[in-house]
Image (spheres, rainbow, N blue to C red):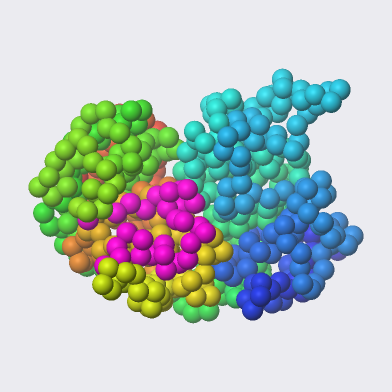
Amino acid sequence: MSTPRLRMVGVRKSFGATHALRNVSFSVEPGEVHALIGENGAGKSTLMKILSGAYTPDAGHLELEGQPFVPADPLHARRSGIAMIYQELNLAPHLSLEENILLGEEPSRLGWVNRARRRALAGRALAELHADHLPLSAPVSDCTIAEQQLVEIARALIGQPKVLIMDEPTSSLTQVDTENLFAVIQRLRVRGVSVVYISHFLEECQRIGDRYTVLRDGESVGTGAMPGADLDHIITLMVGREIEDIYPRIPHELGAPVLELQDLAGETKPRSVSLTLRAGEILGVAGLIGAGRTETLRACFGLDRLRAGSVRVGARAGTRGSPARRLAQGVGLLSENRKEEGLMLNRSLADNLTLTRYGPVARLGFISHHRQRAVAQDWMQRLDVRAQHPAQPVGELSGGNQQKVALGRLLHHEARILLLDEPTRGIDVGSKAQIYRLMGELAAQGKAIIFVSSYLPELLGVCDSIAVMCRGVLSAIRPAAEWTEHSIIATAIGTTGSRNGAGAA
């Protein structure tokens, strides 16, 4: 029997009274794609941070190619052949794409950075991802979250790793970019690279994985061959219970128009968006990276300036609006970039959840910390936020739990119109089903939702109608039942010739 490329045995890790890892063991063979599966807070990211040298385990041991492996720090791990793509992007925003991709691995000559060589290597890494259209000299801060994700992946490929850890690599990617990434993984597999693939998209894990290991509450609770695996069984292992319906359908009816966008155009994107959103409607928006989905929501909410067109909320129409005005009108935005626009990471859960609506937690003009904690505790229970207490800083939570807090703030604000930009990004399958149900319940209450997602199955499973954006233009809107994944992708890349820009069905 061959020696595994990587073995982790009996790994334990605690943070104070919190046991992040209790007893985890798993191994990865050369050229194997091993799917590491579990809910938010199950310990996946902690385990991989131990492997990549960011954390030191309290117990257990690691082996790399049959030899004891004790990474002193991330640089040591990387030079030993361990590369990691973190779920939370770890880029230098003021540096260019080229500089980020080769950061710490800059080619040099006589003590000076070889800029021509650096540019060639960065370009080659992006080309392998079919992302060579991205401008190498542009600062990373100018890129969308999805483009930054591609830069992060390109940086990991530079070092010719032996073990490549991918923590939610497709969470911000469209289906087309995901397909390109899968092709890269297949080439890495042929070259003998071991891939640890962490994802909440079980269909992806089943498609590219050779084996799987499931973590629950810091323990490895199951492992097996991925081809032919029963996804319902894996979900049961993950959550400790059966989930009857991943895409629950809550009956709801469409009412009067509550939001109308007419020929909306931003400084660069969108170029032309017209739609009508009705009370009780869940309208999905699909499209490729850079199509203008995020920019449309930002312009609608007043974060970006409009060059042309109008936004009508209820009976009020205008070309200008600020976030404060939109909040007052009952419009709430969940940004795809929760770290920079969604949350105050150094403040508590209670502060973040109640930030835009202090009325229920105030008394005589002052915030009642007792009421604030009680309200926050209620939302934590309703959304299954895994945290120690309402006073815990949001920055200490896992990415998925941070996303739940950001969504909880909109619900606490009692927004009537919810603009959700990738709301299930980084959230496990059990929590996704919970959020889908919550969206259906909100629609049943007459609230209207625009739901931007790069994951087509959830758009088809949850939405009443789906709009597709192509190159900044809203190119088609039809009932969800009239779409397939293939037709959505064809429209998104502009092969259908549809450019109707009509209102919602």
Q: Which residue occupies 60% across, 58% down?
A: 198
Q: Which residue occupies 65% across, 45% down?
A: 185
* Residue 451 rendering spot, x and y as whole percentages: 33, 52
In which quadrant will I find the N terminus? bottom right
Q: Which residue occupies 36% across, 28% down?
A: 268
Q: Is residue 235 above or below residue 327?
A: below
- On screen, residue 333 versus residue 80, left or right, reads left
- On screen, residue 187 versus residue 317, left or right, reads right
* Residue 493 rendering spot, x and y as whole percentages: 40, 33
The answer to which image quadrant residue 21 occupies is bottom right
State whether residue 502 appears in this view.
Answer: no
Give the number of marks.
0
The answer to which image quadrant residue 461 occupies is bottom left
Decide whether residue 341 is among the magenta residues: yes
In-front residue for pair 203/150: 150
In-front residue for pair 365/309: 365
The answer to which image quadrant residue 501 occupies is top left
- On screen, residue 213 versus residue 290, left or right, reads right
The residue range painted magenta reads 330-359
State whether residue 153 appears in this view.
Answer: yes
Q: Is residue 93 above or below residue 209?
A: above
- On screen, residue 438 versus residue 182, left or right, reads left
Q: Is residue 135 above or below residue 215?
A: above
